[in-house]
């Protein structure tokens, strides 16, 4: 059986192809302005990499904020369902799924059977999402991939506005002017985002184990901050940005 | 899961409801043409009292008027911006800001200039009530204003002294009305208005009570257009008679299984005022076969309820149903005060737990599958404690989704985000889209 999951996120499109229960190919591309065309191109590439023709595919499930552009999907599900399914399938012991992508952060609580009990999504605010970290990395002139690591060099706790990305950015600028070391600022930013996410996690209530998925899970500094806030260990799957696409692939008609 | 299909049809008295509403705003605007008077005040003000000045006294109630403005996004934005240019903060009550904006722009939402009231008659329970009309009075060059403080605690704790506190203010108010308008007060008119108010608000509760039926005869989006009459002139005979007619029709719908939503299979309730410019989110629910059957807000803002002998919640028995004959002004005021103090939506100003208890009760008695809570940034009064309500409902086993917005400021509502939230919520309830074609 061949199942495909397509996650059309705000920044990246991710495709996962599963054959007989095993992931055969996963790939991604920037969402860009031509989302529909980019989805099709990536899908074709994934099929090519797997050596599979379109006729052999049994199900194509789309998810993500842009899931409706996948007009060839056989099913469409929301990010919440896809994230929960993906994370709990990978780790059946997980009951709390934290998904932080480019523009949205969400927390999902599942019961013993992996069924969603409650969820929360960040409101009209970038402060709890990847775009915020990205903007802050730009302000600090640090490559995004170095941001998390750099923050680990700091032990300082600098309070920062965790409620608003705009105010936080102006705080970053003030800290730079005050000659605050960049690692301390990076840690302060990770702490602020973590605090925002923690409040959402606590809103739905968290039950062990906790998994963090989404592109922001590559930020090791953020993981440390989140673990400190939640006072618990967090499981980060390999390829955390693919978990929603994986979950979508598992849900068929 | 088999998808149920019910018969649906439009309410026969729908157009009459529209006509009553239109007349209300016309009557207010045209009051001076026939020597009548206009007054402005909140939807919760004791409108039965100014009715004692005669049959040519026409009110405009601020909240529903502001909701009408909010429905017209272009006009609303101009109103809000006009208020902001005067230096008022953007996080104040959005009804109040829409209303002030209409006054500042001197534009009436129903055409022409804003008709200046002759006096203002308000009560005060939420943090904005009295201030709203103080500022409105100033904006209009100093309109005489009277405000009754009703914050005496929840109904279950009402004592004679607390009741007396209200009744005394009402007596003072009548003296003030006579002095301000130069008219002689007629107690017979007051008594009739009190009877009407008890009748209309109890009837509305009875109508909402019928929505316990499966399928629900009414959906909340339609209920907004019906309950509003009680917020306009709950003390008028026209409204009380209309609610009787509506009750009869809703009973017929229940008996004949005429549904509000064709494929009802998921029953929800909302809370607080909706984002008035985006009522289409309630239509969006129909795609899933979901219906919002009401809320504490739609049921209890004007509906007056009581515990029934069988332990359920039902319409409060009116004085006339109890055979009580009102003979004096003091008796009329006492009944009016007591009646209003038992209003459900006045209870939770004192504790979110009182609201949680009422919401849980609705969730059980109206057989709900879930709850949609509007974190309404436009109304501190009704939104305060809503996060506590959410926890209480979850504890009772009811799935809850929340969405942020504003009843009267469209800039704080994101339709795409809200419908995405509904999609997720429906999936967690195990409900798929039935009909993609429902236009919203």
Image (cartoon, coloured by chain):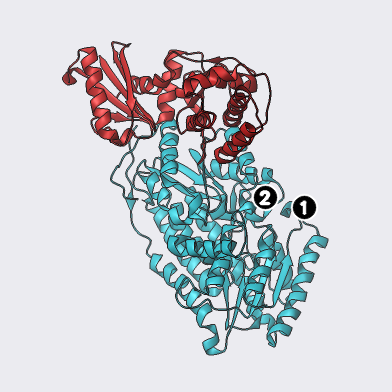
Which residue is most to the right? B161
Q: How far across and how far down the image is residue A202, in percent? A: 61, 29
Q: Is residue A19 left or right of residue B337?
A: left
Residue B348 x, y percent position in the rendering: 67, 50
Q: Nearer the viewer, residue B124 or B292?
A: B124
Q: Looking at this view, is B321 or B287 the one in front?
A: B287
Q: Which chain is red?
A: A
Would you identify the image quadrant in which residue B234 lies? bottom right
Mark number for residue B157?
1
Query: Residue B398's quadrant in the figure?
Result: top right
Residue A71: horizontal and vertical position, in percent? 24, 34
Question: Residue shown at 68%/69% (left/top)?
Answer: B134
Is residue B81 visible to the viewer in this orientation of the structure? yes
Task: Tell me if residue B267 comes above or below residue B183 in the rendering.
Answer: above
Tell me which residue sits at (38%, 43%) in the image: B264
Question: The N terminus of chain B lies in which quarter of the figure?
Answer: top left
Q: Is residue B312 above or below residue A141?
A: below
Q: Chain B is which colour?
A: cyan
Say which mark, if any, is on residue B348.
2
Q: Which element carries disc 1, helix, strand or loop?
A: helix
Secondary structure under the numbered disc 2 in the rendered image: loop
Badge 1: residue crowd in 10 Å (few <14, some 14–19, many ≥20)? few
């Amino acid at each position: 059986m061949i199942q495909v999951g397509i996650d059309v996120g705000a920044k990246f499109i991710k495709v996962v192809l599963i054959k007989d229960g095993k992931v055969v190919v996963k790939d991604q591309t920037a969402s860009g302005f031509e989302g529909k065309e980019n989805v099709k191109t990536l899908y074709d590439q994934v099929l090519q990499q797997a050596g599979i023709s379109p006729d052999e595919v049994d199900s194509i499930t789309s998810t993500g904020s842009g899931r409706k552009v996948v007009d060839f999907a056989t099913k469409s599900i929301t990010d919440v369902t896809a994230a929960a399914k993906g994370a709990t399938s990978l780790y059946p012991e997980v009951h709390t799924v934290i998904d932080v992508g480019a523009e949205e952060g969400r927390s999902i609580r599942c019961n013993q059977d992996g069924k969603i009990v409650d969820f929360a999504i960040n409101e009209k605010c970038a402060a709890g999402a990847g775009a915020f970290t990205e903007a802050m990395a730009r302000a600090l002139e640090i490559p995004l991939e170095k941001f998390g690591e750099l923050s680990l060099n700091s032990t300082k706790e600098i309070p920062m506005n965790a409620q608003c990305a705009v105010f936080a950015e102006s705080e970053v600028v003030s800290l730079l002017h005050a000659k605050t070391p960049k690692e301390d600022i990076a840690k302060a930013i990770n702490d602020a985002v973590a605090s925002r996410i923690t409040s959402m996690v606590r809103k739905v209530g968290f039950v062990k184990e906790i998994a963090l998925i989404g592109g922001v899970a590559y930020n090791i500094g953020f993981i440390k901050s989140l673990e400190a806030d939640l006072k618990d260990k967090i499981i980060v799957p390999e390829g955390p940005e693919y978990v929603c696409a994986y979950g979508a692939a598992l849900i068929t008609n | 899961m088999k998808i149920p299909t019910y018969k649906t049809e439009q309410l026969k008295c729908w157009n009459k409801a529209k006509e009553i509403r239109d007349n209300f705003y016309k009557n207010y605007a045209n009051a001076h043409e026939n020597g009548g008077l206009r007054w402005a005040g909140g939807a919760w003000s004791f409108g039965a009292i100014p009715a004692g000045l005669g049959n040519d006294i026409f009110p405009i109630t601020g909240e529903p008027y502001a909701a009408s403005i909010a429905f017209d996004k272009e006009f609303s934005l101009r109103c809000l911006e006009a208020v902001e240019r005067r230096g008022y903060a953007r996080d104040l009550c959005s009804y109040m800001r829409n209303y002030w904006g209409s006054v500042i722009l001197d534009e009436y939402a129903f055409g022409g200039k804003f008709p200046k009231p002759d006096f203002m008659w308000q009560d005060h329970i939420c943090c904005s009530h009295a201030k709203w009309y103080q500022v409105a009075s100033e904006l209009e060059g100093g309109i005489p204003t009277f405000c009754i403080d009703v914050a005496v605690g929840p109904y279950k704790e009402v004592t004679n002294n607390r009741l007396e506190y209200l009744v005394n203010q009402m007596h003072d108010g009548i003296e003030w009305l006579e002095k301000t308008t130069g008219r002689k007060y007629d107690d017979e008119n007051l008594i009739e208005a009190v009877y009407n108010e008890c009748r209309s608000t109890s009837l509305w509760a009875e109508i909402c009570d019928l929505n316990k039926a499966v399928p629900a005869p009414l959906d909340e989006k339609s209920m907004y257009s019906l309950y509003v009459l009680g917020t306009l002139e709950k003390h008028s005979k026209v409204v009380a008679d209309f609610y009787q007619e509506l009750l009869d029709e809703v009973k017929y719908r229940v008996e004949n299984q005429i549904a509000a939503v064709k494929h009802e299979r998921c029953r929800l309730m909302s809370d607080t005022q909706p984002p008035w410019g985006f009522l289409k989110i309630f239509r969006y629910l129909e795609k899933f076969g979901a219906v919002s059957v009401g809320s504490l807000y739609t049921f209890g803002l004007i509906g007056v309820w009581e515990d029934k002998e069988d332990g359920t919640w039902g319409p409060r028995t009116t004085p006339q149903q109890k055979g009580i004959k009102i003979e004096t002004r003091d008796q009329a005021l006492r009944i009016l005060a007591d009646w209003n103090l038992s209003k459900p939506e006045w209870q939770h100003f004192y504790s979110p737990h009182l609201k949680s208890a009422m919401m849980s009760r609705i969730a059980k008695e109206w057989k709900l599958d879930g709850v949609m809570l509007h974190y309404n940034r436009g109304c501190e009064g009704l939104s305060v404690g809503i996060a506590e309500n959410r926890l209480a409902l979850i504890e009772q086993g009811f799935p809850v989704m929340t969405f942020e917005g504003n009843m009267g400021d469209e800039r704080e509502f994101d339709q795409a985000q809200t419908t995405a939230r509904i999609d997720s919520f429906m999936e967690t309830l195990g409900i798929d889209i039935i009909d993609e074609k429902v236009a919203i």
